[in-house]
Image (spheres, rainbow, N blue to C red):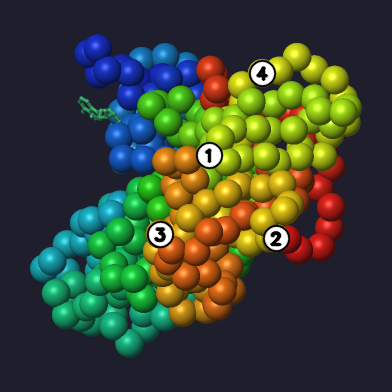
């Protein structure tokens, strides 16, 4: 059992509040990704879980026990950093076995355990090498092995893939996911990379300015972002956001702005109000000029191979459309972009929080 409970964790550095009252319950066996822009407090939060940094507020529990004041080496946790921090003069085998020597295991037991971990991580052939004789990806696997060898209750990882090139990042990502499935261990993983978060996490915890913005499965945070911040942070290109006025027209709610007219698919009466309307690039498509939609001019088209992205301008706002290639749009075209009401996201312009009124999603595609 390695449930990790963050109960109102905070950390101040002088006048800077790096982590602000974070409540998060990580269940045994979960893979939680702490995601957010640089400086949002991810590493500070992870270092507090590891015991490397005392919190200035809140409590921390591991497997039900309060560990807020327990020193790091007595926490049943292993941490893997971005820089591998391997001992350059020691072989791979000795690097992996290091935590066990520190715990005074016998040589035979260490050899057996190292062999087991090396087999898991495909490092058997490399056990006699020195770190300088390894590629970046292999070094990262050795660092993982050194964490794994202790059989910790939970793994903490801080941007472990950010020193790897794109191709190696993708394969190591898959390896870590497979490792998580195989071990069933609890993992808390820090990254600023939305692709890592979307592909690896069982749940994503999004942080902004030290505060938790939203916690949910990758599908939940992508499909129902709780705020403008989350909507902007996840998705590439980012969600289109438009300032509109919503009012009831003939009993149906309609969003309007210059060059914009979109039905929300909601019947009702309400006083007119301002709303931030969001729609993802993959949910927009060109339609006949007579239909309600967003009237825009195409300024550029980017070829992504299997897909195309059209950059458009509507009343001085940029709007992005993404779809299978060819989209059939060319720079200079005048287009009318429509979507289905269930793809519209509504946010409060003041707080940036999601507004709940939205029609139930319909199955099928765009
Ligand atoms: N030791 C420290 N002393 C002072 N400020 C710090 C220290 N560590 C982190 N901070 C500040 O706390 C905030 C969060 O930092 P950090 O947790 O490293 O962010 P992230 O890992 O999300 O990039 C930043 O504003 C950073 O400057
Ligand atoms: Mg960091």
Q: Nearer the viewer, residue 286 or 43?
A: 286
Which numbered disc, 1 or 4, marks the residue closer to the eye?
A: 4
Q: Is mark 4 within 8 Å of ligand 1?
A: no
Q: Earlier in the sequence, mark 2 or mark 4?
A: 4
Nearest-to-viewer mark from 2 and 3: 2
* Residue nearest the viewer, comparing 340 with 15: 340
> Of the residues under marks 1 and 3, which one precedes in the sequence?
1
Give the class, few, some or many, for how many residues have Cα within 10 Å of label 2's Cα (few <14, many ≥20): few
Residues at circles 2 and 4 in contact by the CB criterion of under 8 Å = no
- Look at discs 1 and 2 and give the one toward the viewer: 2
Distance between mark 1 and mark 2 Cα atoms: 22 Å
Quarter of the image where ligand 2 sits: top left
Dot 1: within a 10 Å radius of its alpha carbon, few (fewer than 14), some, or many (20 or more) residues? Answer: many
Mark closest to the chain's N terminus, 2 or 3: 2
For marks 1 and 2, the one nearer the N-term is 1
Disc 2: which residue: 288
Q: Is residue 106 above or below residue 118?
A: above
Q: Which quadrant is the N terminus positioned in?
A: top right
Lateral position of residue 128 relative to residue 166, left or right: left
Residue 302 on image: x %, y %:
41, 69
Residue beneath label 4, please? Answer: 273
Mark 4 and mark 3 lie on one chain; the one further toward the N terminus is: 4
Q: Nearer the viewer, mark 1 or mark 3?
A: 3
Q: Residue at x 75, y 14 (%)?
A: 271
Q: Nearer the viewer, residue 345 or 74?
A: 345
Residue tagged by mark 3?
A: 299
Residue on which disc 1 sits:
241
Tell me which residue sits at (47%, 70%) in the image.
Answer: 330
> Could you tell whether 40 is left or right of 134 in the image?
right
């Amino acid at each position: 059992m390695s449930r990790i409970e963050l109960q109102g964790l905070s950390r101040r550095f002088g006048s800077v509040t790096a982590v602000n009252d974070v409540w998060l319950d990580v269940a045994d066996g979960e893979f939680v990704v702490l995601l957010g822009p640089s400086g949002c407090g991810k590493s500070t939060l992870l270092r507090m879980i590891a015991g490397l940094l005392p919190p200035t507020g809140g409590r921390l529990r591991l497997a039900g026990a309060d560990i807020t004041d327990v020193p790091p080496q007595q926490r049943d946790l292993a941490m893997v950093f971005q820089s591998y921090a391997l001992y350059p003069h020691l072989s791979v085998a000795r690097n992996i076995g290091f935590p066990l020597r520190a715990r005074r295991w016998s040589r035979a037991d260490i050899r057996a355990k190292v062999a087991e971990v090396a087999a898991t991580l495909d490092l058997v052939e490399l056990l006699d090498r020195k770190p300088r004789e390894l590629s970046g990806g292999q070094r990262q696997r050795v660092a993982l092995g050194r964490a794994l060898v202790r059989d910790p209750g939970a793994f903490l990882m801080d941007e472990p893939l950010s020193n790897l090139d794109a191709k190696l990042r993708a394969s190591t990502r898959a390896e870590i996911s497979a490792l998580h499935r195989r071990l069933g261990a609890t993992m808390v993983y820090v990254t600023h990379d939305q692709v890592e978060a979307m592909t690896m996490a069982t749940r994503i915890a999004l942080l902004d300015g030290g505060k938790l913005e939203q916690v949910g499965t990758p599908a939940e945070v992508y499909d129902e972002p709780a705020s403008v911040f989350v909507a902007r942070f996840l998705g590439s290109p980012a969600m289109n956001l438009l300032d509109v006025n919503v009012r009831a027209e003939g009993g149906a709610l309609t969003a309007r702005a210059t060059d914009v007219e979109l039905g929300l698919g909601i019947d009702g009466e309400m006083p007119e109000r301002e709303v931030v309307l969001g729609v993802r690039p993959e949910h927009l498509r060109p339609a006949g000029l007579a239909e309600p939609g967003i009237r825009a001019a195409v300024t550029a088209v980017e070829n992504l191979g299997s897909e195309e992205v059209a950059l458009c301008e509507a009343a001085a706002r940029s709007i992005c459309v993404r779809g299978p290639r060819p989209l059939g749009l060319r720079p200079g075209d005048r287009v009318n972009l429509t979507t289905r009401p269930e793809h519209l996201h509504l946010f409060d312009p003041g707080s940036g929080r999601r507004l709940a009124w939205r029609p139930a999603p319909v199955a099928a595609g765009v």
